[in-house]
């Protein structure tokens, strides 16, 4: 991996999400946060900002990114299974790539930053709350579970996945949406051998877990947060399948989870 000393280009990847209630296409709030961080870094260090989207250029949700400060959006027309390979070809040589942790649509696996960093041979920093450019690379404040934070450094080039709780506030301005531009580019990516191993099918409804209602007091439930206690129950190992099914049926009837 070649080390890059000068930060002359910053790329940010944006995706299209779906509204949780209406299902209408909209901009991803996580990617909007990454865009705001990229804009701040580009203005501070005099770098050229490149905003990329892999998908359909006719999606109206991309206009929102123009209103959020993207001067231009370059759209790479592709399928969802070869987006990483196509983006890797376009981003090769860019010192710093920012993206959200995951998309908010149907293909929100969160694997794109990892696949992109592997294809480019870049260092990957995930769950970034703050990004600062230094002489030797980037300094990142990383989000950790249970409220912990960690400061790490990475050399350029690097891919940084921004956490949704990053302390920035994107500003929406309609005038910027009319002044910006969306340009579509059709490029041919290398054949993706991993795509043949995937099977795309409609989502299946997850089974609903039957849980008995809590009959303990509030004080008793609060104690479970500080103490470890046995919750009871029976472990049925011996017996026929009919006897084991009878035990399960008795439990369901006792807690009124079935009405027969």
Image (cartoon, helix red, strand yellow):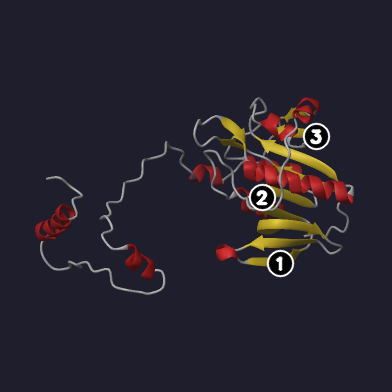
Q: Which residue is mark 3?
A: 71
Q: CA distance from mark 3 to mark 2?
A: 24 Å
Mark positioned earlier in the residue sequence (3 or 2): 3
Above or below for 39 versus 223 = above
Q: CA distance from mark 1 to mark 3?
A: 31 Å
Badge nearest the viewer, 1 or 2: 1
Q: Is residue 8 visible?
A: no
The count of marks equals: 3
Q: Are marks 1 and 2 in contact (CB under 8 Å)?
A: no
The disc placed on residue 151 is 1
Of residues 63 and 115, the one drawn nearer to the viewer in this rendering: 63
Residue placed at 13% from the left, 60% from the top? Answer: 247
Q: Is residue 142 visible?
A: yes
Secondary structure under the numbered disc 3 in the rendered image: loop
Residue 230 location (% of width, % of height): 28, 72
Sort mark 3 into few (<14), some (14-19) or many (20+) by Cα contacts within 10 Å.
some
Residue 24 location (% of width, % of height): 55, 29
Residue 210 location (% of width, % of height): 27, 51
The disc placed on residue 116 is 2
In this picture, residue 232 sits left or right of residue 242 = right
Residue 179: quarter of image? top right
């Amino acid at each position: 991996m070649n080390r890059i000393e000068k930060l002359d280009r910053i790329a940010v990847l944006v995706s299209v999400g779906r509204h949780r209630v209406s299902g209408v296409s909209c901009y991803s709030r996580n990617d909007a946060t990454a865009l705001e961080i990229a804009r701040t870094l580009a203005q501070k260090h005099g770098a050229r900002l490149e905003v990329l989207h892999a998908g359909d250029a006719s999606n109206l949700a991309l206009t929102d990114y123009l209103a959020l400060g993207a001067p231009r959006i370059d759209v790479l027309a592709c399928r969802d299974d070869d987006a990483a390979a196509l983006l890797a070809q376009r981003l090769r040589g860019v010192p710093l790539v920012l993206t959200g942790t995951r998309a908010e649509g149907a293909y929100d696996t969160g694997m794109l930053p990892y696949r992109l960093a592997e294809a480019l041979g870049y260092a990957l920093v995930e769950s970034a709350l703050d990004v600062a450019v230094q002489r030797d690379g980037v300094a990142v404040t990383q989000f950790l579970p249970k409220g912990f934070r960690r400061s790490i450094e990475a050399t350029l080039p690097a891919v940084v996945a921004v956490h949704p709780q990053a302390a920035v506030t994107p500003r929406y301005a309609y005038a910027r949406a009319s002044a910006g531009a969306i340009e579509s580019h059709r490029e041919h990516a290398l054949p993706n051998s991993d795509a043949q191993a995937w099977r795309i099918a409609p989502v299946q409804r997850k089974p609903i877990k039957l849980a008995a209602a809590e009959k303990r007091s509030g004080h008793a439930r609060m104690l479970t947060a500080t103490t470890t206690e046995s919750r009871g129950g029976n472990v049925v190992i011996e017996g026929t399948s009919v006897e084991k099914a009878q035990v399960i049926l008795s439990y369901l009837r006792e807690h009124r989870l079935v009405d027969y």
